[in-house]
């Protein structure tokens, strides 16, 4: 099965600089290429090597780090899109790497299929999402990368390599979250299952109650997450569990009012006001945290897991051992309360089971994620530095696509399989064809 087919690839001299979604990263590649097949991609990588240029692939630019920035060849996977095949016997789908998650989700639903778990936005390309460790929340089901059953990787010498538990297993163990350091992913095979229904229960809850009941809320729900609003004692919790039905989606007007008007339109205005008048932020937070009421609805997975995110922001997220989550959150709340900081964005908390991917933020340990955000254009260094100090004291692992200051020396301490990954990088990319400043910092050179 194939959809969204494209013609031959394109190459062009880069014009205007590339910028990421948040606008905090800019790069000026020498040229941009849009290959339409793995073979064309391999040819472009060999051509870059002949020209002495580095190569990076960029998806939709939703990373807040410079993980995709390059001064060499920028690969845009716009033409590497579509479903290659659906294997209903194996319950897998093989998809081209540049396919946006939102298009994959819609196509799978049309076929009566779904991913088991996903993040809270679906704008990213599938390769961009898995390469940086994008995740949702789950007691038993893990990140998007943990659902990969095979992948196709184009390496620095132009080899098109297939990786799975049976074929090149040592590469598969690392390349599912490869940071773009091992090669360029050209296709991914995901495990899928028959489409199912989720019932979402969203409910306001006080901070102290969430802290005291956190383990119970995690244990009793397939997918639990919550938002805490700084400068308040208010949280908004969300519990997603499988349902036998019937479907009871959000009414169109009610869903639009809360997800678009309140969560995007009004929130955008509130953030703009807070940026202009920071002393007003605590009062705005108290109002915002009371604006969303309890609601319950039942729908297919991607309509429950994901939400529109139109307000632009910067984000830092750390993965902690799950048992450290409530202690770190109480420390974070106390830090905000005793500091002059004014924080307009809620803090997001999610969980994941341990997985077996070398550089997954949940590698080898039950995990809680704590994500902090600030509205685009707001000075962020003071807040993010204070948060990072708390997270690293608990052995936190930074999300690869979100703002952080950690380097290879620190990361080697918190990832037991760090040396396994860097040794594989030395084998697959000895000349550092896929290097950039970010990878030099986090992986060493």
Image: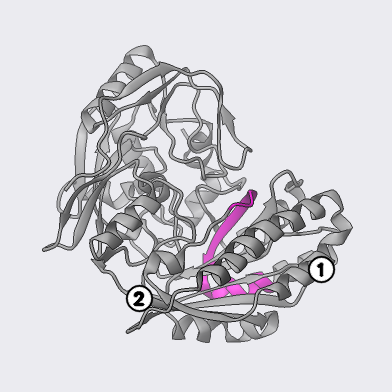
Label 2: which residue? 197
On whether residue 323 falls in the magenta region, the answer is yes
Q: Quadrant of residue 165?
A: bottom left
Residue drawn at x 62%, y 38% as measured from the top left = 23
Residue drawn at x 33%, y 67% as measured from the top left = 116
Q: Quadrant of residue 2?
A: top left
Residue 30 at x, y percent in the picture: 47, 17
The mark nearer the N terminus, 2 or 1, is 2
Front-most of 181 and 262? 262
Front-most of 440 and 64? 64
On whether residue 210 falls in the magenta region, the answer is no
Front-most of 204 and 127? 204
Label 1: which residue? 337
Q: Residues within 10 Å of mark 2 (few under 14, many from 20)?
A: many
Residue drawn at x 63%, y 48% as measured from the top left = 312
Please name the colour scheme applied to the rendered image: one colour
Q: Residues within 10 Å of mark 1 (few under 14, many from 20)?
A: some
Instruction: Determine whether the residue tagged by mark 1 lies in a helix, strand or loop.
Output: helix
């Amino acid at each position: 099965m194939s959809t969204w087919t494209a013609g031959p690839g394109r190459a062009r001299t880069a014009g205007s600089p590339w910028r990421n979604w948040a606008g905090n990263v800019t790069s000026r590649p020498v040229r941009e290429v849009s290959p339409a097949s793995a073979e064309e991609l391999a040819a472009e990588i060999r051509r870059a090597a002949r020209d002495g240029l580095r190569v990076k692939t960029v998806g939709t630019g939703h990373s807040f780090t410079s993980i995709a920035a390059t001064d060499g060849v920028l690969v845009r996977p716009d033409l590497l899109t579509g479903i290659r095949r659906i294997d209903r016997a194996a319950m897998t789908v093989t998809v081209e790497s540049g396919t946006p998650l939102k298009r994959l989700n819609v196509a799978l639903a049309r076929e009566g299929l779904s991913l088991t778990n996903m993040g809270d936005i679906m704008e990213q390309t599938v390769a961009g999402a898995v390469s940086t460790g994008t995740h949702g929340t789950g007691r038993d089901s893990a990140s998007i990368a943990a659902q990969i059953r095979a992948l196709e990787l184009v390496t620095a010498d132009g080899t098109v390599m297939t990786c799975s538990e049976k074929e090149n297993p040592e590469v598969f163990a690392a390349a599912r979250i490869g940071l773009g350091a091992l090669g360029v992913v050209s296709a991914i095979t995901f495990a899928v299952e028959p489409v199912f229904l989720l019932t979402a229960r969203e409910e306001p809850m006080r901070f102290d109650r969430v802290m005291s009941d956190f383990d119970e809320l995690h244990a009793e729900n397939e997918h639990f997450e919550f938002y805490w609003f700084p400068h308040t004692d208010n949280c908004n919790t969300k519990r997603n569990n499988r349902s036998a039905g019937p479907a009871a989606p959000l009414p169109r007007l009610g869903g639009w009012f809360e997800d678009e008007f309140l969560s995007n339109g009004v929130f955008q205005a509130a953030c703009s006001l807070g940026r202009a008048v920071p002393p007003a932020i605590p009062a705005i937070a108290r109002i915002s945290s009371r604006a969303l009421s309890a609601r319950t609805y039942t729908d297919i997975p991607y309509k429950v897991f994901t939400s529109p995110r139109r307000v632009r922001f910067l984000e830092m997220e750390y993965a902690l051992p799950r048992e450290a989550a409530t202690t770190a959150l109480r420390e974070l709340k106390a830090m905000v309360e005793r500091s002059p900081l004014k924080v307009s964005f809620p803090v997001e908390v999610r969980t994941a089971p341990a997985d077996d991917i070398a550089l997954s933020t949940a590698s080898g340990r039950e995990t809680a994620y704590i994500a902090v955000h600030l509205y685009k254009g707001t000075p962020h260094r003071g807040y993010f530095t204070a948060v990072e100090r708390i997270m690293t004291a608990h052995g936190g692992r930074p999300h690869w696509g979100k703002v952080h200051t950690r380097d290879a020396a620190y990361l080697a301490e918190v990832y037991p399989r760090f040396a396994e990954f860097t040794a594989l990088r030395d084998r697959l990319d000895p000349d550092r064809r896929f290097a950039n400043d970010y990878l030099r910092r986090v992986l060493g050179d």
